[in-house]
Image (cartoon, rainbow, N blue to C red):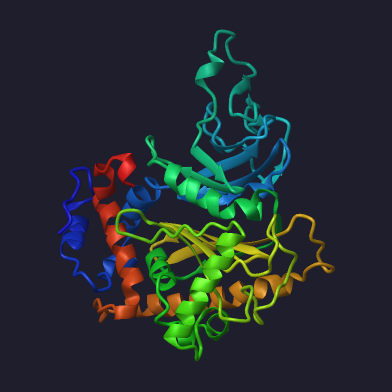
Amino acid sequence: MLAIHPSSANPRIADLIARRRPGWSLEQPFYTDGDVFAADLERVFRRNWLFAGHANRIPQAGDYFLHDFAGDSLIFIRGDDGEVRGLFNMCRHRGSHICLELAGQTRKLVCPYHQWVYEKDGSLAAAPGMPPDLDRGEFGLFPVATRVVAGMIFICFAKEPPDFTGIGEAIHGHLKPYELGRAKICHTRTYQVRANWKLMEENFRECYHCPVGHPEYCRVAMPQGESPEEIAAYRVAQHERWARSGLSLLDIGFTAENGFHCARYPMRPGFVTESLDGQPVAPLLGRLSEPDAGILAIVMFPNFWFEASADYACSMRRTPLSPTLCEVEATWLVHPDAVEGQDYDVERVTAFWRITGEQDWTLCENNQAGVNSSRYVPGPYAPAERGPETFVRWYLRALAGEHEREPASAR
């Protein structure tokens, strides 16, 4: 049984955590209740590292984009020093939003209300009409902890964020030859999925549903007819080839403590990329020299999913909006010099994960509709659903405050 941290949520939520039956899905309030949802935002999302977006969106000094999370608007802006900073989109005078457009380019950040002016690093440059003795050093924009790895922006709202070193090194080690910091965003699509974020995470952590739910995915990524011996031999051969090519084979599996996974694994023989026919759809990324670099998968609870083939990468950022609504932003990246209509076709690049993702959104919405029923009770996970069980254990530990008890080195 989990020990509940003294600062944890209300007694009702503590009771829900304490009586959870291992190996079974969660009780209905975890997927529908407003109090549980509020606790999720505060204890699970705001105290862990989150994926916020791609730095490729802001290549030049002064470029910015906004991201909203649970009432907070954040500005991600490229500074004159080339660094990407995350700043709260809130003027220190009387709280107005400063940037009103979702993305743009600016020399200074100027509040539209009373024209307080901020530098790109968030420092206050001017406060018209204020007394000359105003200490401008005390009124810079509030920062959010920000790390950029392989062109991807991660943030944490916590005053003392968990250690990001190991995660950052693992992501960098895997993605260095892909040079995603230079990659081109070829397409972005946003979905509003009528399901609790945890149902979506559970769905992504198992393939019990794949044979019927994802025929396109299974054709490329799942064995079909090969014997266990053939599969094992092929996997060994692929790993040896990738090692000779200098690709990272670091494999970090999920546990109830770490909430992070990265691994490289092969597609079916004859398939070299995650496309509908398993054949390349764009030029090779970065410094990759062979069309088959396997499937590179990186996942970080609670909101980051990423997969890359040799020719393109796809990320998904999940943002919970209510107990039964979640936003998913999917982004596809290709080589920076690739020319649309000549080197790639957006439809072909996006088809595999657009189709697979949309199949998942339907499955999750159907799941949520059933969970809303007055007759819903938890059901047992199948042996093939070890992933959801690991996620739920991680989630309950975070909700109970267990992660806060561990030293940074243990994460």
Q: Nearer the viewer, residue 165 or 353?
A: 165
Q: Residue 163's image quarter?
A: top left
Residue 401, image x, y percentages: 25, 48
Q: Position of residue 294 (x, y in %)?
A: 58, 69
68 relative to 375 in the view: left or right: right
Residue ID at (39%, 75%): 368
Give the quadrant of residue 378: bottom left
Q: Is residue 295 among what the camera can see?
A: no
As drawn, is 326 to the left or to the right of 102? Answer: left
Depth check: 62 or 216 in front? 216
Q: Residue at 63% across / 81% down in the picture?
A: 270
Q: Which residue corresponds to the image point at 69% horizontal and 71% vertical from the top-left?
A: 349
Q: Quadrant of the N terminus?
A: bottom left
Q: Position of residue 353 (x, y in %)?
A: 59, 72
Q: Nearer the viewer, residue 331 or 131?
A: 331
Q: Image height check: is 263 above or below 104?
A: below
In this view, the residue farthest toward the right is 342
Nearer to us in this view, 199 or 322: 199
From this view, report whether residue 76 is shown above or below residue 388.
Answer: above
**Residue 374 can be seen in this image:** yes
Quadrant hosting residue 292: bottom right
Residue 395 in the image, given as x and y percentages of width and height: 31, 58
Q: Residue furthest bottom?
A: 225
How many numbered marks have been drawn onto this rendered protein structure? 0
